[in-house]
Amino acid sequence: MLFNQNSMNFIGNLDPMVLLERNVSDIKNPCAIISPHAGYIFSGDVASSVFNTIDQNKTYKNVFILSTSHTSHYKGASCLYDDIYTTPFGDMKINKNINMDLCNDSDDFIRPDINSFLNDHTIEVILPFVYYRVKYENIVPIMIGDTNPYVINKLSTYLKKYLIDDNLFIISSDFSHYPSYSDAIKIDNETKDMILKNNSTNFLKNINKDLGYDNLRTRMCGWSSYLTLLYMIENENIDIDIIKYKNSGDTIFSDKNSVVGYFGISFSKKK
């Protein structure tokens, strides 16, 4: 799998190492995180903060990166059968065996399909942070093309066995899209409160409500990826930590009349 040049144009020329050196949070040693996938000038500060909760002394066997497709809609999810993800900063080994097992065991809910990953930046923007900040042996990129809760629940059952101490799950998602600056703060905090409840019924009941906000396109663009994680952890003993929040209106590059929100959130198993 080759890194898409369009993603390099999207993320800009900022060095992720500079971002990672600038923001150091308390180590949470998470089993999962939510990290934004916008251009680094907008969301890199939030992404670096949540990645800095990961213990650099720990080596993960597999880093699962879950994203909701921004280019197509299809049943279930897709994975890569390639051995290597080739990027401008270095090759990243893909756990092809896990991908084969997922495809073989998932009753066609997960399928190999490289086309689902092409021209979609939502996983590629995460990769530099993984490469530079996480000690890992393999990555497992998974693109979700579905928003049907039944299908998402099925996906979670195939993935849950991998939610162990040796693995890390990264959910690639931004939050509200295109409300005003002040509305985004309200909307994103409402979504944050849903996440803190760690309850799928509550989340599904509220995620698509707009409550009359102008120009609100979505509360969370990767909510099906987060819902996959939620189905895996909602009955577990989990600490949820809000690491950082910003929206694009906090930069000089954005109009405060139309912004996108970003949260960095970590999920850790209680000892």
Image (spheres, rainbow, N blue to C red):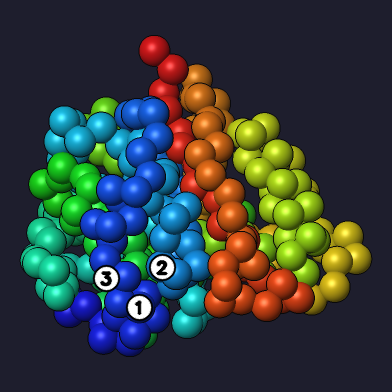
Residue placed furthest toward the top:
271
* Residue under numbered circle 2: 40
State how far apart marks 3 and 2 are (Cα): 29 Å
In this picture, residue 60 sits left or right of residue 210:
left
| Circle nearer the viewer, 3 or 2 | 2
- Residue at coordinates 70% horizontally, 39% vertically from top-left? 193
The picture quadrant where one finds residue 77 is bottom left
Classed neighbour count for the residue bearing mark 3: other residues with Cα under 10 Å, few (<14), some (14–19), many (≥20): some
Q: Earlier in the sequence, mark 3 or mark 1?
A: 1
Dots 3, 1 in contact, CB < 8 A: no
* Residue under numbered circle 1: 12
Dots 1, 2 in contact, CB < 8 A: yes
- Tell me the element at label 1: loop
Kind of residue at disc 3: Pro
Answer whether residue 156 is visible to the viewer in this image: no
Kind of residue at disc 1: Gly
Kind of residue at disc 2: Tyr
* Residue under numbered circle 3: 112
- Tell me the element at label 2: helix
The front one of 237 and 150 is 237
Residue placed furthest toward the right:
212
Answer whether residue 209 is visible to the viewer in this image: yes
